[in-house]
Amino acid sequence: MRAALKEAEKAFAADEVPVGAVVVDPADGRIVAKAHNLGEHGQDAAAHAEMEAMRRACRKLKQNRLWGLDLYVTLEPCTMCAAAASFMRIRKVVFAAEDKKGGAVVNGVRFFDAPTCHHRPEAEGGLLAEDASALLKNFFRGKRQKLSIK
């Protein structure tokens, strides 16, 4: 999760929503791919950290599924990212902070619990949640301050 937090810090520095993700091989702890949000400046609303990390892992491994690999992300995945993790056959999703409004693992639609979900990754939340939450709060606090100055 620390590597995912470093990615989130890169996003923060680039004025992107500070979410980071890494795809890890649990057999040896090797990071297969890492990414952070690119949606704002990449002008792609689907360029979430999880999507980017999973896409990079697929390209690196030259395959379209990520059997046996784990996804670490600093914020609870949304419905799109949870669905992608399922379709890509991620073994386990580990997230830091819960997302009460947009999350889809333990909040919202709880995608992995849906009867239409064909592959249900294990899910675990709360790892380094305070660090991830603080980064997000600082980012949005800064955004609100900039808006009130104008």
Image (cartoon, rainbow, N blue to C red):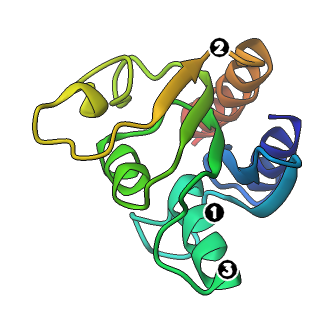
Residue 25: x %, y % from top left: 76, 53
Give the crowd class for mark 3: few <14, some 14-19, many >=20 residues within 10 Å. few
SS class, disc 1: helix
Give the crowd class for mark 2: few <14, some 14-19, many >=20 residues within 10 Å. some
Residue 111: x %, y % from top left: 26, 33
Q: Between marks 1 and 2, how big is the CA–CA gap? A: 20 Å
28 vs 144: above or below: below
Q: Quadrant of the N terminus?
A: top right
Reading the image, the residue beneath label 2 is 126
Mark before the other along the chain sequence, 1 or 3:
1
**Mark 3 belongs to which amino acid?**
Leu
Q: Between marks 1 and 3, how big is the CA–CA gap? A: 12 Å
What label sits on residue 61 in the rendered view? 3
Residue 68: x %, y % from top left: 60, 51
Q: Relative to residue 67, is residue 116 drawn left or right?
A: left
**Mark 1 belongs to which amino acid?**
Ala
Q: Residue at x 51, y 50 (%)?
A: 90
The reply to whether callout 1 and callout 2 are in contact (CB within 8 Å) is no
Reading the image, the residue beneath label 1 is 53
**Mark 2 belongs to which amino acid?**
Gly
Mark before the other along the chain sequence, 1 or 2:
1
| Residue 38 can be seen, yes or no | no
| Residue 138 can be seen, yes or no | yes
The reply to whether callout 1 and callout 3 are in contact (CB within 8 Å) is no
Q: Quadrant of the C terminus?
A: top right
Q: Residue at x 30, y 32 (%)?
A: 112
What label sits on residue 124 in the rendered view? none
SS class, disc 3: helix
The reply to whether callout 3 and callout 2 are in contact (CB within 8 Å) is no
SS class, disc 2: loop
